[in-house]
Amino acid sequence: MIGYGVRYGLLSTRRRRKALLLPGLTTATGAFLVVLVFSLAPAVRQQAAAFGHADQVFRATLLITILVLLTGVVEVAVCTTRAISQRTREIGVLTATGVARPSVAAALLIEPMAAAAAGAVAGSVLAVAAEVALAAAGSLSASPAPEATGLAVALAIGVSMVSAALASILPSWRAASRPPIHSLSHGG
């Protein structure tokens, strides 16, 4: 039954793709920074050593990077809440026609997960392309290690997906749990 909710969620996501542009772009920015900072960690540390406090500068850079990534996730959660409030009647119709609560929640979760995944993948691809371009131009003082880049890409995508799911599951479940009459009579 959840499969129907997932398919409906994919159709809905395709229909509302313009609304997902900003959350995806914000997540892409965070993923771009995470991949660059983690894969270029040796170069960042070397540059930070020139300032005299390598560990503190690196930690500050890392913290800012993670905050940008989490800002993208918050944007995804805000987008989810907005989408749920705009689709109150639609959710009411789904629940009134007998669609199970888990299927409705799954349909609502597809949108934020798709935005987070697309943004994280796009940001990671751009970061890897930037690394390759910078290395080819000789602009890097240390070459990025492929295993560090792979780990950074996995981390950026994983953190984006898990955070988007955690930030969106409660509003999605609450919306799916509302009585249909309430959603239909008070809907947007």
Image (tube, grey):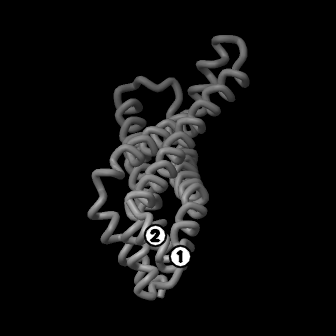
Q: Quadrant of the C terminus?
A: bottom left
Q: Residue 110's quadrant in the figure?
A: bottom left
Q: Is residue 158 visible?
A: no
Q: Residue at x 49, y 71 (%)?
A: 182
Picture coordinates of residue 162, whole percent (x, y) = 58, 58
- Residue nearest the observer in this picture, 158 or 36: 158
**Under tag 2, what secondary structure?**
helix
| Of the pair 53 and 30, the residue shown nearer to us | 30
Type of the residue with mark 1: Pro
Mark 2 Cα-neighbour bin, 10 Å: few <14, some 14–19, many ≥20: many
Q: Residue at x 42, y 46 (%)?
A: 23
Residue position marked by numbered label 1 in the rendering: 179
Separation (CA) of disc 2 from disc 1: 7 Å
Name which residue lies at 38% across and 58% down.
86
Residue at image mark 2:
183
Say whether residue 139 is left or right of residue 179.
left
At which x and y percent is residue 45? 64, 25
Please state the horizontal and vertical placement of residue 5, each as a whole percent of the image.
43, 79
Do callouts 2 and 1 mark residues in contact (Cβ within 8 Å)? yes
